[in-house]
Amino acid sequence: MRRNVIWGIGVVAALAAGRALASPPADFAADQRIVYSDGLHSENTTMIRLGGRILLGFRGGEEGQIGSDRARINIFESRDQGRSFTLLSEVDAGNLPGGRDIRDPKLVKMRGRLFLYAISRLPGFHYRDLGGQAWAVRAESTDGGRTWTEPVKTYADGTGGGETFWGFWRYTPRTYKQGGKRHRALFATGYQDFDTAVGLFASDDGITWEKRATIIESYDDVPSEAELQFFGKNQEIAVALVRLDNQGILEDGQTAICTAREPFTTWECGRRIEQRLDGPTWAVRRKNGRVRNFVFARKHLPCTRKRTAIYELRGDLSDANAPIEVCEIQELSSSGDTAYTSLAPLSRNRSLLAWYSSPVDQDLPWFEGISSPSDIWLADVDFRRAPATCVHPVPEESCPQPPLPAATSAFDVTGSHLLTLAPVIWPAQILSFRADVQVHDGTIDLALQPLDGVSKAPVGAPWTVTGVAVSADGRFAASFGTQAVPVQAYPLLNDPLLTVNDFVLTGATTSGDGFCGSIGGYAQVYGTSPSDRIRLEGSTFGAVRITAEALPPAVTACPLQ
């Protein structure tokens, strides 16, 4: 089958700040405001309209994304078109075994019944959800969301007597005719622990679910959150937009556009767009025979920064051979850990949009953002103001390396130094070494001894390189190749197999007592796949001579010019 892909044609240049679009229609999503803030980490929004009421749900109760039984789903109610909200109810997973977390809520009405679906995992941090033992859970309300039944597991694959741990992401109704009768079924997309497969599930009542198909399966693509829509006169064509983390854990990846015809058992996923759409919400607008597809999702910037943005996908998404054009409409107030959007209709052409974000006055890296406070935001979206022209996303950019100090002259830095590395993913969570340096005539030898992150005692074997050329102004590039990072040296990632690869210190001597610069290469968090990597560009280091038994204060970058 022919696979047409448009990566982005006629790209506009980024402005000096690097991210602004040329004359964006700022009023497409207007009146951006914080609706909830409690100093904790609030995330993962869902909304539904019930007559004259709007229910807003989101995960709260935690200080970060790492889950525990403290997590809860907060349900708020608005009776004034989203201008104000009051707390209506809360749902936690306290009745489930193992101190489980609850997150990713979805409010769905099916056959007159109001369901709250969510994903529940075991407590702790789970890389690629490995070991989280995800359950798709369900609670029900008979009084419009004021009270809820306790969450119960709503799907378990009993093949071979075991549980395969599927977390359901998106719930989409399908209305169709069969045998001359009108039917309505509820479909869901879900993904497995370890983020290796996305499946399609169906239910006639919202309670009993069966797996219909595997949409996509690939370790290297890291498929997870998938949007789902139905097209055609009888909704006989299913289309899924599948998030792919296939270009690095924190980098911009791709989105697969997958299609299937009834009975939706065989899927084609050849089309890809060069935007990784995390936690998306997909709105299909039909008018005068024209279909427009809007996606609200997380956007990825250089240096592991994130935003919430609005896109339009142009082209026939239901035709597996049709090219797709990506247009970026607007970047919303957001930073750090952000997105996981939701929509609720206000009128025929207007909707209420919700998302979450770290403090917007602190442009935190995403990894720091997941352990920091975040707020719930709202905006009013007017689809009549959707732009007619297409502005393509700015091409992907690497994180720029900070400049070295102004050229002076080479200094003799022979001796022992405390070298402190500030990783681009979270500069405050430093990695420390004792750097033993020997200066020769025009070259240096370096030995970097990793230090325990708490006690600063030596751990593991030193990383060494000899004969590194030093220029007359003290500049050098020391390549260490591939090195193992002891768990004690950087417990933040907590992976005994963590390595740094193509590791290069690019630096300059600043005095007889120090040198500084930046880092190149990548950290391999798990396995060997490129999707399990974190780029190190944007990381900086500083080294200060050790003159006494006590280590000197840490310096993590070159002095400001």
Image (cartoon, rainbow, N blue to C red):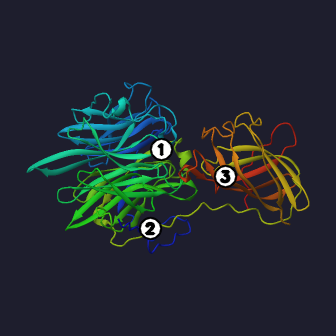
Residue under numbered circle 1: 374
Q: What amino acid type is highlighted by mark number 3?
A: Asn
Sequence-wise first label, 1 or 3? 1
Q: What amino acid type is highlighted by mark number 2?
A: Trp
Residue 500 x %, y %? 66, 49
Q: From this viewpoint, is residue 332 visible?
A: no
Q: Which mark is residue 7?
A: 2
Task: Give the side of residue 526 with respect to residue 330, left or right.
Answer: right
Q: Give the mark count.
A: 3
Image position of 388 with respect to 410: above or below: below
Q: Which mark is residue 501?
A: 3
Image position of 9 with respect to 269: above or below: below
Task: Give the side of residue 172 with respect to residue 520, left or right.
Answer: left
Residue drawn at (26%, 47%) of the image: 80
For label 2, the SS is loop
For label 1, the SS is loop
Q: Between marks 1 and 3, how big is the CA–CA gap?
A: 33 Å
Residue 486 x %, y %? 69, 39
C-beta proximity under 8 Å, tags 2 and 1: no
* Residue at the farthest right position: 441
Q: Between marks 2 and 1, how big is the CA–CA gap?
A: 32 Å
Sequence-wise first label, 2 or 1? 2
Task: Give the side of residue 547 with respect to residue 256, left or right.
Answer: right
Q: What amino acid type is highlighted by mark number 1?
A: Ser
Sequence-wise first label, 2 or 3? 2
* Quadrant placement of the N terminus: bottom left
Q: Between marks 2 and 3, how big is the CA–CA gap?
A: 29 Å
